[in-house]
Amino acid sequence: MSIKQPGLAGKVQQSAKIRWLILATVSIGTFMATLDSSIVNVALPTISTEMRSGLTVLQWVATAYLLTISSLLPVFGRLADMLGRKKIYSLGFLIFTLGSVLCGAANNIWLLIMMRVLQAIGASMMMANALAIITAAFSSRERGRALGLTGTVVALGSMTGPVLGGLLVGLVSWRAIFFVNIPIGIMGFLASQMILPADQPQGNEETFDYAGAFFFTSGMLSLLFAVSEGSDWGWGSAVILSGLLSGVILLVFFFITETRVKHALIDFSLFKIKPFLLGNISGFSLFTAIFAYVIIMPFYLQQILHYSPAQVGLLMSAFPLTTALAAPLSGTISDKIGPVVLTTGGLFIISAGLFYLTTVTAQATTWQIIPGPILMGLGSGMFQAPNNNSIMSSVPQHKLSIAGGLNALVRNVGMVIGIVFAVSLFENRQAAFLNSLTHPTSTQLTSAFISSFHIVMLVAAAIALIGSLISLSRKR
């Protein structure tokens, strides 16, 4: 990317004030997009009652958001490299804010779902470019610290969502969880227009790969839908099998298309860069392992230990809170010693936290449980900023946006796979334990739950441990 105003490039590199203002501007979008992925879950029961919608349809309020983001991240990363990161990022603010207004005004469940898709389009425009903008603005001496602070913003967004959502739904209305984005979105758009450096592509002769975009988006939507709904619909159902098959076929067509076009949507040569490849694989293992914990842990706390929703929220917040505290420090240290020790150690600590949870029982106290989430939060905070720094610093400047989009895509797919793997494995093991019991007692049901929970945590720990070994093999 080249800068339209030569003086601005020098200021970005020399003035800490401008660099940190850029970080603050990007953090607004990051916080808003992360907040909205978690805030809506608290409001689903209320929305269900008001709109008289069953769980099967209602879950798409959350699912449509995640699937849309995952399928569009590389598309907007490529467009930003072609048209300019500032344009795409700023437009993302506007689309997200408009989607929020329309979500809050929706009068039926299907309109709400469609407006959530519009929200997700705006969120993907911001997510695909956040890391690229930060990487371009900060030198290698400060980049890890900046990305560490970004990790803190992500953790705070995840932690704030359920709490703020509960307050807004209880005190105002479920519509308030969407309307709260309006002032944040307007402020973010104005800040992006005034602060982000204006940029444009190095070569205007590049064309957009429409065929590749169609095959990728359609393939990812089909595949992720099948994977995310397989447990509910049944893995042998015609719908799920059709989704899996069509998703694979479309992505094969996508790969063939990318090898034949001059300006590909995804430059597969990026995966020949060792830090980029290994960083994304180890990042995938992290999010797969973490979201196995995130999806199963609340059921253990509520169904076995009989915690209230508020108590569950407080205990679960130990993980993102520890991440928020550890991420800036880890990012700063990585600027001095490189990523390998921190990323490898972080995944190992996550593995240790998950393994610790294989020891909890049906009579565990809060103090016996809490070391697990704290260890995981510490490991996550150690890992994410150095890993993102390693990935983004390894690619050419003019490919930063597509690299950032791919990094975000790996994160989202890891979340989906982690949830699906955990739910499927848990249900399979629980059914196996209860298979020979016609009328299981409450003690037997509890025992089956705890045994299945332990197995899921153990497999997740193994995934994180494998990720740490992969991370260890990358170059400093």
Image (spheres, rainbow, N blue to C red):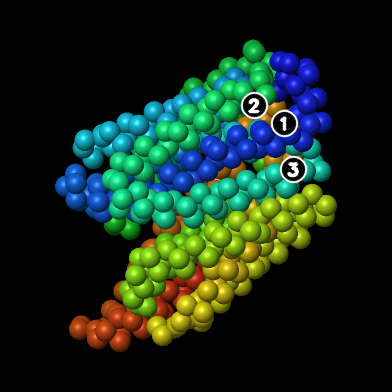
Residue 307's image quarter?
A: bottom left
Rendered image: mark on residue 143: 3
- Residue at the far left: name it: 52
Amino acid bearing label 1: Ile
Q: Quadrant of the N terminus?
A: top right
Q: Secondary structure at mark 2?
A: helix
Labels 2 and 1: the sequence-earlier one:
1
> x and y percent of residue 11 in the render?
78, 26
Is residue 447 depicted above or below 336 in this figure?
Answer: below
Question: At x 58% / y 48%, what residue is drawn?
Answer: 153
Rendered image: mark on residue 195: 2
Question: At x 64% / y 53%, what residue is drawn?
Answer: 384
Question: At x 49% / y 41%, what residue is drawn?
Answer: 32
Q: Secondary structure at mark 1?
A: helix
Q: Is residue 227 visible?
A: no
Q: Residues within 10 Å of mark 2 (few under 14, many from 20)?
A: some
Question: At x 64% / y 68%, what residue is drawn?
Answer: 349
